[in-house]
Image (cartoon, grey):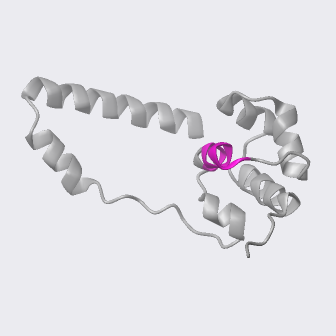
Amino acid sequence: MALPLDYKIIGERLQKARKTKKLTQEQLAESLGISNGSISRMERGDLKVGLPRLYKICDKLGVSASSILTGNPQEQQAIPLESEFQNLLSNSSFSEQKMIYEIAKTVIKVNREFNS
């Protein structure tokens, strides 16, 4: 039999992860396209967060949903993409490789600006 989820504890863990990331409730809410009040209510345990939304929040906070649900901190594991990326590039034309490179540079730049 599964144990019921304690949304108050989940909310506390979300709040801790948000503060570790140095984000305000407003900043997190804006990045998710939801209201500041929703974040506040989730962190208090007054609003039950569903799994799809939890995964989106965890992605923004750089934590695993498992760590929020269980309390066991886990670093997000990097997916071993090097060989897959190399395979993708080797099967692409020069113009496609150039486009992939420019897109990757832009994604990295925007991500670093957002997270700084």
Q: Is residue 55 visible?
A: yes
Q: Quadrant of residue 63?
A: bottom right
Residue 55 point in image, percent of width and height: 61, 48
Q: Quadrant of residue 26?
A: top right
Residue 116 point in image, percent of width and height: 59, 39
**In this image, 55 relative to 112: left or right?**
right
Residue 44 point in image, percent of width and height: 91, 51
Q: Residue at x 78, y 57 (%)?
A: 16
Residue furthest out toward the bottom: 1
| Towards the viewer: 29 or 69 | 69
Q: Residue at x 88, y 59 (%)?
A: 8
Residue 46 lies in the magenta stretch: no
Q: Is residue 116 visible?
A: no
| Towards the viewer: 90 or 50 | 50
**In this image, 1 relative to 107: left or right?**
right
Q: Is the N terminus in the top left, top right, bottom left or bottom right quadrant? A: bottom right
| Towards the viewer: 29 or 19 | 29
Residue 93 lies, with reference to residue 85, above or below; the image says above
Q: Which residues are magenta?
A: 50-58
| Towards the viewer: 92 or 54 | 54
Residue 34 lies, with reference to residue 80, above or below; the image says above
Total label count?
0
Q: Residue at x 66, y 73 (%)?
A: 72
Residue 83 point in image, percent of width and height: 19, 56
Q: Residue at x 51, y 61 (%)?
A: 76
**In this image, 44 relative to 64: left or right?**
right
